[in-house]
Image (cartoon, rainbow, N blue to C red):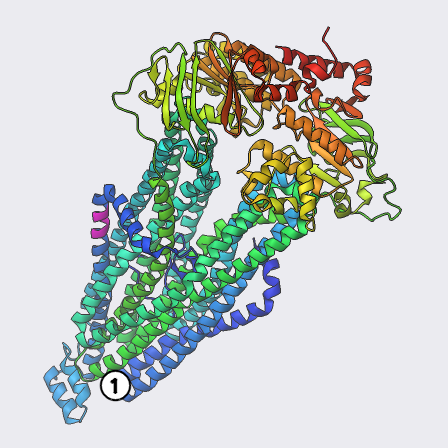
Amino acid sequence: MIPLLRTYLRPYRGVLVVISLLLLVQAFTNLYLPNLNADIINNGVVTGDIAYIVRVGGVMLLISAILGVASIVTVYYSARTAMRVGRDMRRDLFTRVESLSLGQVNALGVPSLITRNTNDVQQLQMLVMVGLTMMVLAPVTAVGAIIMAIRENAQLALLLIVVIPLMLAVISIMVFKAIPMFRAMQTKIDRVNLVLRENLTGIRVIRAFNQTDREEVRFEGSNADLTDTALRVTRLFALILPALMLIMNLSSVAVIWFGGHLVADGSMPIGNLTAFLAYIMQILMSVMMAVMTLMMVPRASASADRINEVLATHPDIVDQVDDPAGVTTPGLVEFRDVDFRYPGAQEAILQDITITFEPGTTNAILGGTGSGKTTLVNLIPRLLDTTQGDVLVGGHDVRLQPQEHLWKRFGIVPQKAFLFSGTIASNMRFGRPDATNAQIWHALEVAQAADFVRELPETLEAPVDQGGANFSGGQRQRLAIARAIVRDPEVYIFDDSFSALDYATDARLRRALSDEISGATIIIVAQRVSSVVTADHIVVMDYGRVVGQGTHEELLESCETYREIVASQLEVAAS
Amino acid sequence: MSSMRPGAPGGPPPRGPMGGGPGMSMMPSTEKAKNFKASMRRFAHRLRPERGVAVAVFVLGSVSVFLTVLGPKILGNATNVIFDGIVSLRIPAGMTQDQAVAALRAQGEDEQADMVAAMTLTPGQGVDFEALARWLALAAVLYLIASLLSWAQNYLMAGVTQRTMYRLREEVDAKLGRLPLSYFDSTPRGDLLSRVTNDIDNISTTLQQTLTQLVTALLTVIGVLAMMIWISPILALISVLTVPLSFVVTMLIARKSKPHFVGQWKWTGSLNSHVEEMFSGHELVRVYGHRDAAIVDFDSSNEKMYESSFRAQFISGMIQPALTFVSNLNYVAIAVFGGMRVASGAMSLGDVQAFIQYSRQFTMPITQIAGVANLLQSGAASAERVFELLDASEEEPDDSDAARIVDPAGRISLENIRFRYHEDTPLIDDLSLDVEPGQTIAIVGPTGAGKTTLVNLLMRFYEIQAGRILIDGINTHDATREDVRRCFGMVLQDTWLFEGTIHDNIAYGAESATQEEVEAAARASYADHFIRTLPEGYESKLSEQGENISAGERQLLTIARAFLADPAVLILDEATSSVDTRTEVLIQRAMSNLREGRTSFVIAHRLSTIRNADVILVMNRGSIVEQGNHEALMEAGGFYRDLYESQFTESPDEVATGFTPE
């Protein structure tokens, strides 16, 4: 946590100096006020010198005013600094995540990354905010007050040797006990979340099976568990303040008792007793303030670890030096002896892949689940790097092309048709901000989406909910396809992108695609033979290897696996 | 925050353990101030089951505050003992107090004379340590009891809070069980989750911090005021004057900070959804070259969020220094007037000292209340969101004398059904259909035709607006939903499994099933084989959403589940995308096993299913356009025929491949 905060506070060093100076002013004025208070009692009240009281009172007010102004300026700077630290952290987190590869993002987990970007940063931001005032003010005030207390009476100050360690002991025990409880509580909140999320996603099944009661029992279990832990934490905290208050109050009793003896001895004026009481309160209050800040540390520290984890993740795919001789044949995609193994995996998911997709052709990759099709296509735009061998796009190694340039060549439609909130137009312009309405309509026509878009009251300006939730699965897929077409890329990659379409729409779309975008290379990942028969080139995958390449007819002749797949699908259709 | 003694001048006010006070209460001040009172009242109502404990908390709090408030007065008495002692030493032994006073007057020291006259002195005796010990022991005991009581109060309050939160979560969960499906279909899941966890959490924090603080702060103000009046009504008057002043200062600042708090949370929300979207669509953002645009958008929300949170923090952070100044003003005024009164003998030094301490105790809870008021705003906003959920209109409850559907044969009749999701968008008008037990109904239609609507109506997930649906001649509207749903088994494309073992997932809805029955169901659905290849077989744990087995295997499990439930009527979705062909064969076989002897509604994708169906329902744009069997529909030459021809003459499954199995 400390290095993270140090990094993010570094740009605000100057402001930190100002804040520290202001806090020193506050600390000193805080310390000076009881002094004046003692003077008022010793020299004013005891001797009945009203003029003195008024004069010193005036000084007190002046100092209070200085204190007030100093505090407000401190709050200004510390709020600004803390919120800027939060802002900077969020920006760095977001920018970093945006530069990570898909594998890295999935390893960290999207929901967790979202929480880290807002909630975790918030924890640290608050710690900085409170810390900037408390962490400096409390120790300075405490040390100053200890010095003043010793100056008032060194003997009486010995009390602090007992009181302060006692308070620290109480605090440490509590914090020590609370940390694991807090961790457990977070896990149990997660659990409540999990059960509830399951209930929401499975609502139809639960109702269909009449299991509402059973799910309520399950929820009750995790709810009771959470309540139990939360109760233990809050009950533990219930003890902290009364305990600290008791120590503080008993200290003042002790001060009067021992101080009374000193006053009786004549070794201390009675006014000093009052001042001493004030100092001791100040010391103890400072300790308490520090404690309250310390209470935030366990949570903030957990958050800092989570933020550090992201910031310590460096993109595993980075641009290398560009070779300007570069791209010679736009639209050409080649795999040369490619192996791929996921980090930590025992077996390679792809082995000895050598394929050439010629420019302007329609290509298909066919294979069962787990045969490595998606991994294969992810290698093309360099969303992953090969373990061995080369992937070439346009006749040039993808690792030697800047990613931003490389990506411009592709129109990718992923398995899950994901739309962004906004409008149809904003989604269509996602990969090409300057696309004209005519270009968008053309893309929608090709993708067989123009009809339903036209029927929407706002047509292109029709709102799209997050994830495209206000469109059906088939509509989403067609919009995602149109989004790719708008880019007018050299290479299209369709990763099982027609699954939600009925046969008629599917067929019309394919026809339109081959008519309209004949210049581009098309690569289709598919499960179904029906989706691939018309392709110029079919690659059959099985267990990470290419087991056959060629046209439908050629493969029927030459490829056993292909024949099996065809046969099994006919069997399914016939059953 | 009970039994809190005053801080030194300028000392920061104490905060609750989980963070209170102006610095940490960075929750939104609600924009709907008009609902604030109503929400608070409703919330107070929720505390009713805790009435007994709440009274105990209040009593303990009052006593604790009372004792704490007495403390400084007693310490003041102790100081008086010391002061009297040293003054008495200045009076020569043998002289009485009256003589000493007279002597002082003779010296013209009238003020000192007055002071001494007001004291109880035994000249020459010195400090009466026995009396001092008595006072201090009393103070120590009072403090000890006060702390114990305050602990008990906090302890009980923790119970009140957590139990209330427990009940609120339970209530929300039970509510979710009574809400109609339309509610879930139209509300984002993340928002619902957030209400149950984040908002209830926020209410809990608010409750824990504000209630005890508010009670003790108010009691302290009252108690301290009483003590101040008792000691010196005139000085008390000065302190009372600070109340309206503090109030005005707080209100002025709070009013300024409120819009910024609202802004802060608004921008946090918009930032969060931007982040959520961009991370969810990570690969698209990168490959479509949208990264820089995404960062620009992020920066703009981030900057706005920073601006408003900084302003909110700064402005609300001014409350404390401002009130501290007011408090110091009060302090000096009391020192001046108190000093004059001691000098004139109208008040003892100990009393002034006690009074000064009281005045600190008086202004501090006022600062505290100011902070609490801020925190309450945020709690009220969350409470409103939770109440909104609790107020959503529920499903019509089942009749208590509902008709029972026992051992149904599976005869389904739809009579003149009318249904619309939105009143002005026509959907199903006047649909009738008779299905004999064991028949198969194929539902066909293009993408987005609304095939699931029919499922929704059959299962009574949605209520029809006119007409009747009969199962074995019983109107489903008159039966309990449970009975209706027990008639159906559902295998949908969107497989749902919960976190638990494979056994439990298959036995979902049939907890009493034996291991043999579970295995038989798994065998019938071709799931047995893959289950046995898993390391722990039927006891293998599935993660949430069953991500540790493949999509096809998940589907097999849901079929096994339907087998075990043994319903009279089936609802099947044949679509099996993203499944490899071998698994698909298994799924098809399992489904046709399952259909044997049962009435089936099939969302059909296979030509064979459609041809063999007893009735085909042709759906388009959400409504049923045609119904009949294959031959009849082909003959009619309507939408079905077009659909059939466009789909299946181009479907290479049987036609275009030109390949016939040997």
Count all numbered tags in the image, as a single digit: 1
- Does A379 appear above or below A429? above
User: Of residues A75 and B144, which is closer to you in this image?
Assistant: A75
User: Of residues A251 and B34, which is closer to you in this image?
Assistant: B34
Q: What secondary structure is marked by label 1? A: loop
Image spot of residue A425 (x, y percent) = 62, 46
Q: Which residues are magenta?
A: B54-59
Q: What's the chain of the residue with tag 1?
A: A
Q: On the rendered structure, is B91 left or right of A463?
A: left
Image spot of residue A156 (x, y percent) = 35, 69
Image spot of residue B88 (x, y percent) = 18, 79
**Which residue is located at x 53 percent, y 47 percent?**
B273
User: Of residues B549 and B298, which is closer to you in this image?
Assistant: B298
Q: On the rendered structure, is B432 left or right of A267?
A: right
> Can you name the residue that lies furthest to the front here?
B636
Whether A50 is among the magenta residues is: no
- Does A74 appear above or below A564? below
- Does B597 appear above or below B644? above
Image spot of residue B215 (x, y percent) = 26, 56
Q: On the rendered structure, is B306 left or right of B6?
A: right
User: What secondary structure characterizes most of the magenta part?
Assistant: helix
Is residue B491 in view?
yes
Is residue A100 in view?
no
**Mark 1: few/some/many CA within 10 Å (<14, 14-19, 20+):** some
Quarter of the N terminus of chain B within the rendering: bottom left
**Which residue is located at x 57 percent, y 32 percent?**
A473
> Can you name the residue that lies furthest to the top here?
B662
Q: Quadrant of residue B662?
A: top right
- Which residue has dot 1 on it? A47
Amino acid at dot 1:
Thr
